Image: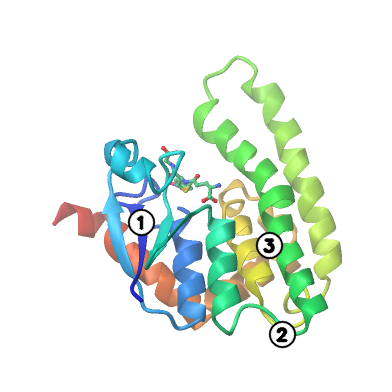
């Protein structure tokens, strides 16, 4: 069955791979699944046709036969459960890998998103200078404990899993703040994720859509 995902027609990041379709593309590449992409504009995302797929009018979405999914956690888990390559077979190891997916989305991503919002949208506020270090410290706290847990390991728990895919994707969004580089083992962990052939294919595919040269032509 054909898999179709949605992605920004023009991602605001200009092809840095930070929009969330990249993690879905990465999961599809890791598991060897062919997919199509339907590009959507910001106004189109708020129209009934897209809202029927995504209740909050966002990307990415995932369609496969009669199934329509939204939320990258649900989409990546669906892909990982149906195709080999992203989840261990042993039930307990699988549950642990899924726990790391949730940790990435529920525990590590929120402070990173908050920091992005502060840096992108709140620079002109009178309280910016006071608030920024507080929010940075919340990110640092999470990265510190994640760094301690990862230690010298290659991946979070055993072989590369959907938990690592999600954690690397989330950590990538903290790189521009400079905080990731304060933790060399986490920076190296993210670099290992980016070095995977499947990630490179996913990144190249979104770049082909979003690179400035692509939009100019
Ligand atoms: N919890 C949802 C999920 O995980 O799927 C969140 C989905 C989401 O935030 N989608 C964003 C979106 O559609 C795109 S990824 N936003 C449009 C809207 O809400 O109207 C978030 C994102 C956007 C841009 C950048 N960037 O340019 O760097 C990075 C990440």
Q: Is residue 30 left or right of residue 98?
A: left
Q: Secondary structure at mark 1?
A: strand
Answer yes or no: is residue 9 visible.
Answer: no
Q: Answer left or right for 92 relative to 10.
A: right
Q: Residue at x 53, y 72 (%)?
A: 79
Quadrant in the picture for residue 153: bottom right
| Crowd around label 1: few <14 · some 14–19 · many ≥20 (10 Å) | many
Residue projecting furthest to the front? 66
Q: Residues within 10 Å of mark 3 (few under 14, many from 20)?
A: many
Mark carried by residue 21: none
Q: Nearer the viewer, residue 82 or 114?
A: 82
> Which of the two marks, 1 or 2, is nearer to us in this view?
2
Q: Earlier in the sequence, mark 3 or mark 2?
A: 2
Question: Which residue does the numbered mark 3 point to in the structure image?
Answer: 101
Element type at mark 3 = helix
Q: Whole-percent x and y of residue 78?
A: 56, 68
Tell me the CA gap for discs 1 and 3.
Answer: 21 Å
Q: Which mark is residue 6?
A: 1
Quadrant of the frame with the C terminus: bottom left
Point out the tag, 1 or 2, that comes first from the N-terminus: 1
| Residue 94 x/y as whole percent | 74, 75
CA distance separating discs 3 and 2:
16 Å
Closer to the camera in the image, 112 or 166: 166
Whether label 2 lies within 8 Å of ligand 1 gets the answer no
């Amino acid at each position: 069955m054909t898999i179709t995902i949605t992605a920004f027609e023009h991602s605001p990041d200009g092809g840095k791979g930070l929009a969330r379709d990249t993690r879905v593309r990465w999961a599809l590449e890791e598991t060897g699944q062919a997919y199509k992409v339907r590009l959507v504009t910001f106004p189109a995302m708020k129209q009934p046709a897209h809202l029927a797929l995504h209740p909050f009018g966002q990307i990415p979405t995932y369609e496969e036969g009669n199934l329509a999914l939204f939320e990258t956690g649900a989409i990546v888990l669906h892909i990982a459960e149906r195709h080999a390559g992203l989840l261990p077979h042993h039930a307990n190891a699988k549950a642990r890998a899924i726990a790391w997916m949730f940790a990435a989305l529920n525990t590590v991503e929120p402070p990173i998103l908050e920091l992005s919002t502060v840096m992108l949208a709140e620079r002109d506020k009178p309280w910016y200078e006071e608030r920024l270090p507080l929010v940075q410290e919340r990110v640092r706290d999470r990265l510190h404990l994640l760094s301690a847990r990862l230690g010298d390991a290659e991946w979070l728990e055993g072989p590369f899993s959907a938990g690592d895919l999600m954690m690397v994707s989330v950590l990538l969004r903290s790189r521009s703040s400079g905080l990731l580089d304060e933790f060399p083992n986490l920076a190296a962990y993210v670099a290992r994720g980016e070095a995977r052939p499947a990630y490179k294919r996913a990144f190249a595919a979104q770049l082909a859509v979003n690179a400035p040269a692509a939009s100019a032509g």
